[in-house]
Amino acid sequence: MKKCLRIRDVIIFLLITLVSCDNNSSPSQTIANLTSDPIITENDSDTSVFITNLDVPIDQEILSAISFSIRPMANSISEAISARYEIDKLEIVGGIIKLPIFGLYSNYRNSIDITFTFTDSSAKNMSYVVDAAEYVDPNNIYDDISILSSVNIENKPTYNYIFIEGKPSGPVILDIDGNIRWVGNEDINSRSSYFENNSFKIAIDGRLMTLSLDGSQSETTVSQEGLSNISFHHELSKGKFGYLAHINAEKNGPQIETIILELSPNGETLKEWDFGEIFSEYMINNGDDPSNFVRDGIDWFHSNSAIYDPSDDSLIVSSRENFVVKIDYDTNEILWLLGDESKFWYTYPSLSALSLFSNDIKPMGQHGLSLVEGELSLFNNGQPSWNNPGGTSSGQKLSSSIASRYQIDLESRTAELTWNYDPGLYSPFCSSVYRDQSIVNGDYLVTYSVISIGPLRFGEPVTTLLHGVNEEKELLFAFQFNTIPCNVWNADPIHSLSNIIF
């Protein structure tokens, strides 16, 4: 026999259904609310051809995030650039969501896959095409790249992108296929720069600037009690709490490339190291007269690279004129020196007592310090001193520059060369070697900033080379630029620019 519902039961059922729909399945929260694809339009206010913005007319209340991915060119080896913006990170004007897109190929019709993620976790995919203009480098460096040896899928580097620090074109990102994929809106000197969290920190003209991949930027002024006329030089690197910056400043007279500051992300000075003071105090306390070694107003030290070593809470600093020095982070105690012992500095007993013994070639005019599996990595330019006092030894000169790693044993006070890469190229200034450290057994990126066929003259053309190299010293790729000395200062591998989160 069929059962019939009573009127009261029907009313109760309808009320429950309505309440359920209202609490859990509001039409404004679902993809079904979109009756058609949103009409996306490009609204490009950026001067950089690698960055643009899309206007997206969708109700922000139904969205939790928007993602984009730029499809790689045919036969590309580097992975796609992609990013996800949480909805509260995007600018919304008059109901139009402003979606920044970065990493475009220049002079190319870029296919962009866009994903809308809704508040109920459903998603909708669309595609959009952006025709990017041709990149013309006003400094004639990065719009003329020669690929001497291209990547291949069988021997792909562990990293996909290259961050080039230099001047004057600003920070540059290159993919391992040899395509420029990012240059900012402003032509700036980015020699003192560091890349992390999808943005660049750039120390320039007494300011600490934050420049995001989406083209947005902010800045703050850097100051330190007792210092005036602060200007930055050489690299910016990660410190214990902030960023290690190399400065020139006035401090009882001009201090040239002897002071390092640790800066917080907002530009506050956290700590100062004055190597003129550090070495003067040490030498006097150990029976030496520092007056002919530490010379204010002369580039006697020439700091060009600094890193923090968390293993023993210390700072390792490259003094191009002399050696690599390690000091205690808090007390400034000098722990060791590693450098060419035929240079002037070694004639001081107090300094020679700190020198590490090695049967291998020691650093000479070195750049680009880093730690690789606890070992000291650097680019050994093989360059003698330039500013030692007249009548003293400037040291040796190598016939080729060597990317080097040293294992340092403090108990035996020795330094052993454990890895090197030497293809017979000589780069006397700038340059670097860095390893992809986001993955086990990552590959290396070696930068030869200054390759000159004839006599080197600053301001005249030279060649810059980038070599991708693995642990077995196999060449993975080689790129060439034509520029002037040190315009391409150094370069760092970027493991990935996929799935970036804003």
Image (spheres, rainbow, N blue to C red):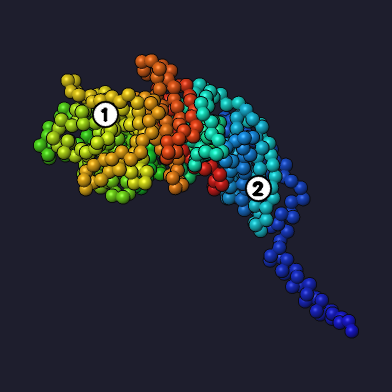
| Displayed quadrant of residue 490 | top left
The disc, 2 or 1, on the residue closer to the chain's N-terminal end is: 2
Label 2 close to label 1 by CB (< 8 Å): no
User: What kind of element bears circle 2?
Assistant: strand
Report, in whole angstroms, how far the alpha carbon at label 2 lies from the one at label 1.
54 Å
Q: Residue at x 24, y 36 (%)?
A: 359
140 with respect to 433 (left or right): right
Q: Residue at x 33, y 40 (%)?
A: 418
Q: Residue furthest bottom?
A: 1
355 with respect to 5 (left or right): left
Q: Position of residue 166 (x, y in %)?
A: 43, 29
Q: Residue at x 10, y 37 (%)?
A: 287
Q: Does residue 426 show up?
A: yes
Nearer to me, 414 or 377: 414
The amino acid pointed to by label 1 is Glu
Q: Residue at x 56, y 44 (%)?
A: 498
Disc assigned to residue 115:
2
| Displayed quadrant of residue 405 | top left
Q: Residue furthest top?
A: 454
Q: Would you name the residue on which mark 1 appears?
A: 321
Q: Residues within 10 Å of mark 1 (few under 14, many from 20)?
A: many
Which one is closest to the eye, mark 2 or mark 1?
A: 1
Q: Position of residue 454 (x, y in %)?
A: 38, 15
Q: Position of residue 468 (x, y in %)?
A: 46, 34
Nearer to me, 100 or 399: 399
